[in-house]
Image: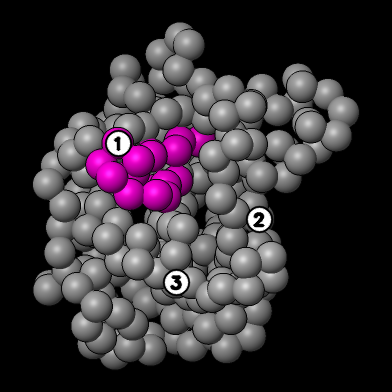
Amino acid sequence: MRIGVGNAGRGLTLAALLTGLVTGCSTGDGESDGVAAKGSNGSKGSKGSTEATATAQVAERGATVGAAGSACELPVTFDTAKSWKAKAVDAGEASEAGGDLADLADALLHQGPVTMACEIDAKPAGNIGFLRVWTGKPGDADARGVLKAFVAAGEGVGKTSYRTFEAGGVTGTEVEYETTSEVLEDTKTEHALAVTTPDGPVVLHLGGLDDQEHERMLPAYELAKSTLRVGA
């Protein structure tokens, strides 16, 4: 599997990761299957939708990530929104730090069956949040099972809505869910999707500081989903 640094020196430093990482996902009740979910324009999608929402807003294209020589080398390729900045995440750096810092970083870099491999920052585009890519080891797990395990490994999840999506030649599973922060006493919406590849499963996750930031960043998520391809 191709994860980690695309070019020399592009790995995300441990200090930057611990400073910038905003966590939030999962375990929970309130799961629904194919229930209507909000599109990026704030409207409700069709129940049981099996393809990308036709009315979803898609961001203006910037760089493409995933291929050899790009900011992040991944089992998939997709377009990032204009001005968003991608950085590869080197999970091996955390284990080299030692002590409690290594334990904390390791916990933040792994969620369920997948490990963070790429972080795409919205700040250069004027938003607060990240589109993160997580990759796993090859195996027999299907996209839905991987995504459910990813969500179940987080904290503070309430309502979840899973559905199948199709984009180009890719079919996978998508989830919209709510997470509640005990510290901030706030509930927000998050989106994630999963696909399987010969090199292992891939999860794309979009969080955000709050619901307002999340809505503003959804077109970037929709762009990534609509341009997602397996392989280079």
Name the amino acid type tagged 1: Pro
User: Seen from this angle, which residue lies furthest right?
Assistant: 99
Compare marks 1 and 2 and give the one earlier in the sequence: 2
Residue under label 2:
112
Indicate the quadrant where residue 216 lies. bottom left
Compare marks 1 and 3 and give the one earlier in the sequence: 1
State the SS at label 2: loop
Density class for disc 2 (Cα within 10 Å; few <14, some 14-19, many ≥20) is some
Residue 158 sits above or below residue 201 on the image: below
Residue under label 3:
189
Task: Give residue 224's position: percent from left, percent from top.
Answer: 26, 50
Name the amino acid type tagged 3: Thr
Residue drawn at x 76%, y 40% is 104
Cα separation, mark 1 vs mark 2, equals 30 Å
Is residue 138 visible in the rendered image? The answer is no
Residue 61 sits above or below residue 148 on the image: above
Assess whether residue 124 is covered by the magenta stretch: yes
Density class for disc 3 (Cα within 10 Å; few <14, some 14-19, many ≥20) is many
Residue 29 sits above or below residue 188 on the image: below
Residue under label 1:
124
Cα separation, mark 1 vs mark 3, equals 22 Å
Density class for disc 1 (Cα within 10 Å; few <14, some 14-19, many ≥20) is few
Cα separation, mark 3 vs mark 2, equals 20 Å
Compare marks 3 and 2 and give the one earlier in the sequence: 2
Query: What's the magenta region?
Result: 117-132
Is residue 47 visible in the rendered image? The answer is yes
Name the amino acid type tagged 2: Gly
Indicate the quadrant where residue 154 lies. bottom right
